Amino acid sequence: MRAYIVISHAYMSKGVVSSIKMIAGDQTQIDFICGYVDGNQDMDRVIRTKLDSMNEYSEIIIFTDLFGGSVNNAVLRVTGQLKNIHVITGVNLTLILGILLASEEDNIEEVIRENITEARNGMVYCNDLTTDNNELEDF
């Protein structure tokens, strides 16, 4: 069984998980950590505590907001030697939903890689899609 954690600076992770639950229904296997708010200054400790509470899961997928940021660095410090934990940074809804809704039978590393590609393809500068008269082109 897989669990998912979205971790961000401030409240982004809470909003992302709220949006996921609105789109995909109640997803009890996903949780969030809001970094550096409400006394969450020691991110290493906060992350360890969250992981300790999830020991019934065989795999944990952690999404962070910013590669090289303090939240991502704390996750990597805490999870560096742990097996069955996958860390992905630079999250968006497309990425998380694709991974979250994948079958438990699918190879998680393949699922992650495929969904990163899909998420990248979903980033579009919409101004490039308009014509001179501001109507969307067929795509």
Image (cartoon, rainbow, N blue to C red):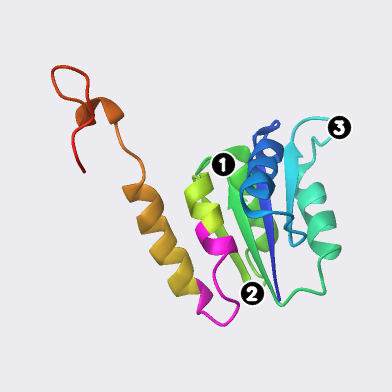
Relative to 67, 136 lies left or right: left
- Of mark 1 and mark 3, the one earlier in the sequence is 3
Q: Is residue 103 magenta?
A: yes
The answer for how far apart the CA atoms under marks 2 and 3 are is 29 Å
Q: Which residue is mark 2?
A: 84
The three-letter amino acid code for the residue at tag 3 is Gly
Dots 2, 1 in contact, CB < 8 A: no
- Say what amino acid the circle numbered 1 marks: Asp
> What is the x, y in percent for residue 121?
32, 49
- x and y percentages locating residue 123 in the rendered image: 35, 41
4 left or right, relative to 136: right
Sequence-wise, the earlier of marks 2 and 1 is: 1
Q: Is residue 58 above or below residue 97?
A: below
Q: State which region is magenta.
A: 98-108
Identity of the residue drawn at 51% across and 42% down = 68
Q: Find residue 39 and name its label.
A: 3
Q: Which residue is mark 1?
A: 65
Where is residue 128 shown, x and y percent of the image?
A: 21, 29
Other-residue count near label 3 (Cα within 10 Å), few / some / many at <14 / 14–19 / ≥20: few
Residue farthest to the bottom? 105
Between the C-alphas of marks 2 and 1, the distance is 20 Å
Q: Is residue 110 left or right of residue 101?
A: left
**In the rendered structure, which disc, 2 or 3, sits on the residue that comes first in sequence?**
3
Look at the picture and state if 98 lies above or below 74. below
Graded by Cα atoms within 10 Å as few (under 14), some (14 to 19) or many (20 or more), the crowding at tag 1 reads many
Q: x and y percent of residue 26 in the render?
A: 74, 55
Q: Are marks 1 and 3 in contact (CB under 8 Å)?
A: no
State which quarter of the image contains the C terminus.
Answer: top left
Q: Residue at x 65, y 69 (%)?
A: 81
In front of the other: 21 or 60: 21
Q: Nearer the viewer, mark 1 or mark 3?
A: 1
